[in-house]
Amino acid sequence: VAYRRLGQARKAEALLRTLLADNTSLGKVRFELVQALLSQKRFTTARYQLNVLLSSENDPSVRRIYRTLDAHINTLRPWSSNIAIDFAPSDNINGGSTRDSFSVGGRQFAINPESRAQRGWKGRITLDGEYRFLADEKQSAAAFGIVASDLFSDPDLNRYRGTFGIRYNREIGKGVSLQTSVAPTLQWTTAGFYSHSFRPSLRIVLPVGRKWRTGIFASADYAFFKQTTNSDGWMGHFGADVTPSITPHTRLRLAAQFLFSNQGQPAFQYDGYAVTASLEQQLPKRVKIDVSVILGQRFYRAPVALLGTKRRDNFGTMHIVVTKADWAVRGFAPQLKLGYTVNNSNIAFNHHAGFNAGVGFTRRF
């Protein structure tokens, strides 16, 4: 505080971040960090730190203070943006089958080599921006746009995607908040694939004591796909999650959800479920590690043509991201990213697995 009052905001920031590295639950220290960042006109970073406080505070009176400061930041800088660049080699760049053949009526048929797993690398450039409109200390409406470009080593797999959405959040009272959004998306590839979708979502966040928060959520996509044939329909999920506070250095999220899809032909429509566990762990020397694991099943509603068998998938993904908070290359913070995906299907053509490892760079403006 003394450094900040003397106009030495950078020294104040360094000291406050050191204190938070030892104990991330120090709300007053993080609030002072927000003030130090505002003194340097680093509005986006200050808003991020303020959102961390809002996500962990259930006391209505304290939340009102944070919301008032959030409104003040919004008058100073109503917009924010982010750029992320990722490069990752993969042993299954095309999501192809890891099987060589499949059986029909006791006869074995080879899977086309182009449909099998292929090694390669992929890069992704993601740009996103947000412009916020605040109504009062209890509610906020935000319009935001996201533009993403995916670049693959195979030109035929180049993919481009654009999204524009509107989000509305409202503090209902007693720590309960309502979050809604609508986001239409357009996606196309150089191979002729084209789709557009419309995604409404709803989430209700409820406090459970001072250290637990739970959420009830639902999201759906109405999508139209065009490639060799056209199809459309709904797909989505609904469920609940809980975020208990384990230690000052650890944040955990557990979620369970039901899945559904009626897109395309009946053989491609399914019902299912998934469970998710994600962990954010602060390590010494300002290293942060994020781990997420998803496991689930999909049960398809009709038999696959020619095979006479209903498809059933057991799927799983694991992602690990390691970030060194005080490293930057011209303002871009590096990240190490590891990922593994598996889809164990009773239909050999749809059985696949893949591992990727890469480096990403991100910067907020």
Image: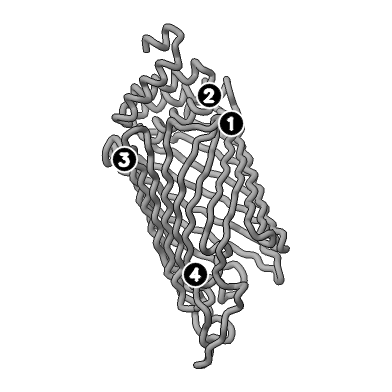
Instruction: Quadrant for residue 142, please give it.
Output: top right
Q: Earlier in the sequence, mark 1 or mark 4?
A: 1
Q: Earlier in the sequence, mark 3 or mark 1?
A: 1
Classify mark 3: helix, strand or loop.
strand
- State the residue in front, 298 or 344: 344
Give the Cα separation between the discs numbered 3 and 2. 26 Å
Q: Nearer the viewer, mark 4 or mark 3?
A: 4
Q: Residues within 10 Å of mark 2 (few under 14, many from 20)?
A: many
Give the Cα separation between the discs numbered 3 and 1. 27 Å
Q: Earlier in the sequence, mark 1 or mark 2?
A: 2
Judge from the rendering whether residue 110 lies leftward or rightward of residue 290; answer left or right: right
Q: Residues within 10 Å of mark 4 (few under 14, many from 20)?
A: many
Q: Earlier in the sequence, mark 4 or mark 3?
A: 3
Query: Residue 333, relative to residue 35: is it above or below?
Result: below
Residue marked by disc 3? 250
**Contact flag, marks 3 and 1 (Cβ < 8 Å):** no
Query: Residue 197, relative to residue 242: is it above or below?
Result: below
**Contact flag, marks 1 and 2 (Cβ < 8 Å):** yes
Residue marked by disc 1? 80
Classify mark 1: helix, strand or loop.
strand
Give amino acid for label 4.
His
Residue marked by disc 4? 352
Q: Residues within 10 Å of mark 3 (few under 14, many from 20)?
A: some
